[in-house]
C-alpha cells in the first residue's frame, strides 16, 4: 500500500521533472525579487550620483570633502586588477592546446586596436576643426598660471617607441604587480602561462590553484562592488563641489563638442561594427550599464576592469580571448582618450591663436598614435599624455595646457565610458574573429533571457 502512495512514487524521470519544476519556481521567485529597482547596483549608483550632484551643488565645501570616498573605492579595485589579470591570462592560456593561437589572437587584437584608435583620432581632429571651440578666445599666455600644471609635467616624457617598448619589461618580477602597470603584468602572465604549458602534467596542480584563486578574487570584487554607490557618491560630489558650474559655462563649447564627438564615435563607428558582428550596441550598453555609471562617476576606467572581464565571459567570449584582449585594450585601445587628446590639443592651438596647418595636424596625429598608448596605469593619465604630446611637438605653447586643467575631470566623464564600450566591442569582435564566441549565448544574454544570464 505504501508503494502506491504518491510520496513513494519513485520513477527517476518523474522525480527529475518534479525537481526541475521546483527549481524553476524558486529561480523565478529569486529573479522577481532581484528585479526590484532599488536592489540593482546600477540604480543604486545612479541614485548615489544624483545625491552627490545635489550635495556638491548646494554645499561645495562639504562636497569636496567627500573625495576620500571615491579615492578609497578606486584603490580597492586597483589592488585587485594585477592578480585578476595574472590568474585569468595564465589559466586561459595554460588550458589551450594550440599555444601558437595566443600570438595570433594578440596580432589580430593589435591590428584592430590600431585601426580603431586611428579612426578615433581622425574623428577628433575633424570634429574640433569643424566645431572650432577655441576660436575667438585670444588667450594671453602671460596671464595664465602654469604652476598648477608642473606636477603633471614630471611624468610628461616622450621617449619614443623604443622607450615605450622597454617600459613593458618590469625591473623585477614583483615590481610589475606593485606598480600596477597593465602591460608589464600581461607580459609576466603570458610568460608564466607558456612555462606551465611546457611543464605539462606536472603543472596541473598550479593551474588548478590559479583557477581557484581567480574565483576567489572575483568573489572579492563582488564584495568590494557593494561600496560602488558610496564611491560614486564621493567622486561626483567632489567633482561638482570643486569645479562647480563655472568651468562648465566658460568652456562649455569645448565640453559639449567633446561629448558629441564621443557619441559620434560610439554610434557612428562602434554601432556598425556591432551590427556586423550580429549584436546591438544599445543592448550591450544596457548590459554593462553598471560599469558605465561607475566609470562616469569615478572617471577611471580601471575601476570596472575585473567585472568587465567577468561580464564578457558571461556573454560567451572565451576566457583566453577576454584575458588577452581586455588588459591589452586598456593600453592600446583607448578610443575615448584618443578623442580627448586630438580635440584638446587642437583646441589649445585655437585658443592661443597658434596656426596648425594640414601637415602639422597630420604630424600631431602621428605623435598621438604613439603617445596615446602610454595613457594607462598613471593617475590623470590622459592629462599627463596631453602635456607630453604638447611638449614633444613644440608647436603649441606648453603653458596653454593649464586652460583645460579645471575641466579635465569633466571631460574624463566622457572619455572613460567611451574607452569601456570600445574595449567591450573589441573583445566580442576578436572572439568572433577567432571563432571563440558563443553567439547563441551572446544574443540570449543581451536580450535578457534569464536562463542565459551569466553566473557570479
Image (cartoon, rainbow, N blue to C red):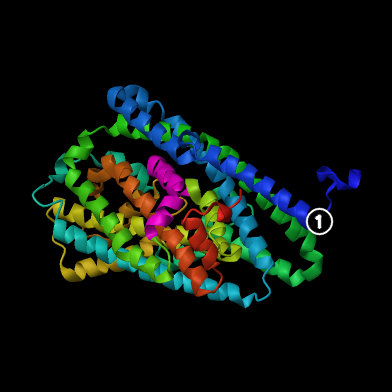
Q: What secondary structure prevails in the magenta region?
A: helix
Q: Is residue 252 left or right of residue 204?
A: left
The count of marks equals 1
Q: Which residue is mark 1?
A: 12
Task: Determine whether the residue tagged by mark 1 lies in a helix, strand or loop.
Answer: helix
Q: Does 1 lie within the magenta span?
A: no
Residue at image point 65% right, 56% down: 87
Judge whether residue 256 can be spotted in this image: yes
In the rendered image, residue 241, in percent from the top left (x then y), is placed at 31, 29
Examine the image and state in which quarter residue 161 appears: bottom left
* Mark 1 surroundings: few (<14), some (14-19) or many (≥20) residues within 10 A: few
Task: Pick whichever, 395 or 27, lies toward us.
Answer: 27
Residue sitting at 63 percent across and 44 percent down?
Answer: 25
The residue at the point 57 percent across, 44 percent down is 79
Query: Considering depth in this image, is 202 or 158 the residue closer to the camera?
Result: 202
Left or right of residue 328, residue 286 in this image: left
Is residue 391 in view?
no
Task: Name the quadrant of the N terminus.
Answer: top right
Residue 289 at x, y = what percent? 43, 47
Q: Is residue 287 magenta?
A: yes
Foreground: 302 or 355?
A: 302
Point out the stretch of residues depicted in magenta: 281-302
Q: Height in image: 382 above or below 113?
A: above
Question: Where residue 166 sits in the image (x, y, percent)?
Answer: 50, 64
Q: Position of residue 32 (x, y in %)?
A: 54, 40
Residue closest to the far right? 1
Amino acid at each position: 500500500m505504501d508503494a502506491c502512495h504518491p510520496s513513494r512514487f519513485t520513477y527517476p524521470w518523474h522525480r527529475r521533472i518534479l525537481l526541475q519544476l521546483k527549481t524553476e519556481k524558486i529561480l523565478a521567485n529569486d529573479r522577481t525579487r532581484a528585479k526590484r529597482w532599488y536592489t540593482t547596483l546600477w540604480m543604486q549608483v545612479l541614485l548615489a550620483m544624483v545625491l552627490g550632484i545635489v550635495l556638491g551643488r548646494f554645499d561645495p565645501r562639504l562636497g569636496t570633502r567627500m573625495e576620500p570616498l571615491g579615492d578609497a573605492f578606486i584603490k580597492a579595485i586597483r589592488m585587485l586588477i594585477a592578480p585578476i589579470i595574472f590568474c585569468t591570462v595564465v589559466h586561459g592560456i595554460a588550458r589551450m592546446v594550440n599555444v601558437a593561437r595566443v600570438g595570433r589572437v594578440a596580432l589580430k587584437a593589435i591590428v584592430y586596436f590600431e585601426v580603431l584608435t586611428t579612426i578615433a583620432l581622425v574623428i577628433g581632429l575633424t570634429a574640433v576643426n569643424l566645431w572650432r571651440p577655441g576660436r575667438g578666445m585670444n588667450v594671453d599666455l602671460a596671464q595664465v598660471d602654469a604652476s598648477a600644471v608642473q606636477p603633471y609635467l614630471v611624468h610628461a616624457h616622450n621617449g619614443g617607441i623604443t622607450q615605450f617598448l622597454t617600459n613593458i619589461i618590469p625591473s623585477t618580477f614583483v615590481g610589475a604587480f606593485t606598480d600596477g602597470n597593465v602591460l608589464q603584468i600581461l607580459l609576466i602572465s603570458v610568460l608564466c602561462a607558456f612555462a606551465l604549458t611546457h611543464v605539462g602534467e606536472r603543472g596541473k596542480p598550479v593551474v588548478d590553484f590559479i583557477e581557484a584563486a581567480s574565483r576567489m578574487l572575483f568573489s572579492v570584487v563582488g564584495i568590494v562592488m557593494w561600496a560602488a554607490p558610496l564611491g560614486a557618491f564621493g567622486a561626483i560630489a567632489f567633482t561638482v563641489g570643486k569645479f562647480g558650474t563655472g568651468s562648465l559655462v566658460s568652456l562649455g563649447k569645448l565640453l559639449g563638442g567633446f561629448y558629441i564627438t564621443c557619441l559620434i564615435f560610439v554610434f557612428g563607428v562602434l554601432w556598425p561594427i556591432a551590427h556586423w558582428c550580429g549584436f546591438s550596441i544599445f543592448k550591450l550598453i544596457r548590459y554593462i550599464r553598471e560599469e558605465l555609471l561607475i566609470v562616469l562617476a569615478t572617471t577611471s576606467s580601471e575601476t570596472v576592469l575585473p567585472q568587465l572581464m567577468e561580464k564578457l565571459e558571461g556573454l560567451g567570449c572565451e576566457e583566453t580571448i577576454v584575458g588577452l584582449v581586455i588588459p591589452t585594450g586598456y593600453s592600446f585601445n583607448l578610443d575615448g582618450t584618443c578623442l580627448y587628446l586630438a580635440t584638446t590639443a587642437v583646441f589649445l592651438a585655437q585658443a592661443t591663436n597658434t596656426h596648425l596647418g594640414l601637415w602639422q595636424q597630420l604630424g600631431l596625429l602621428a605623435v598621438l598614435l604613439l603617445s596615446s598608448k602610454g595613457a594607462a596605469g598613471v593617475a590623470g593619465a590622459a592629462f599627463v599624455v596631453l602635456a607630453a604630446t604638447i611638449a614633444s611637438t613644440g608647436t603649441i605653447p606648453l603653458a596653454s595646457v593649464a586652460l583645460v586643467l579645471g575641466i579635465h575631470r569633466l571631460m574624463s566623464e566622457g572619455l572613460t565610458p567611451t574607452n569601456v564600450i570600445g574595449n567591450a566591442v573589441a573583445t566580442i569582435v576578436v572572439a568572433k574573429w577567432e571563432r571563440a564566441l558563443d553567439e547563441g549565448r551572446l544574443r540570449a544574454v543581451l536580450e535578457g533571457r534569464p536562463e542565459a544570464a551569466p553566473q557570479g
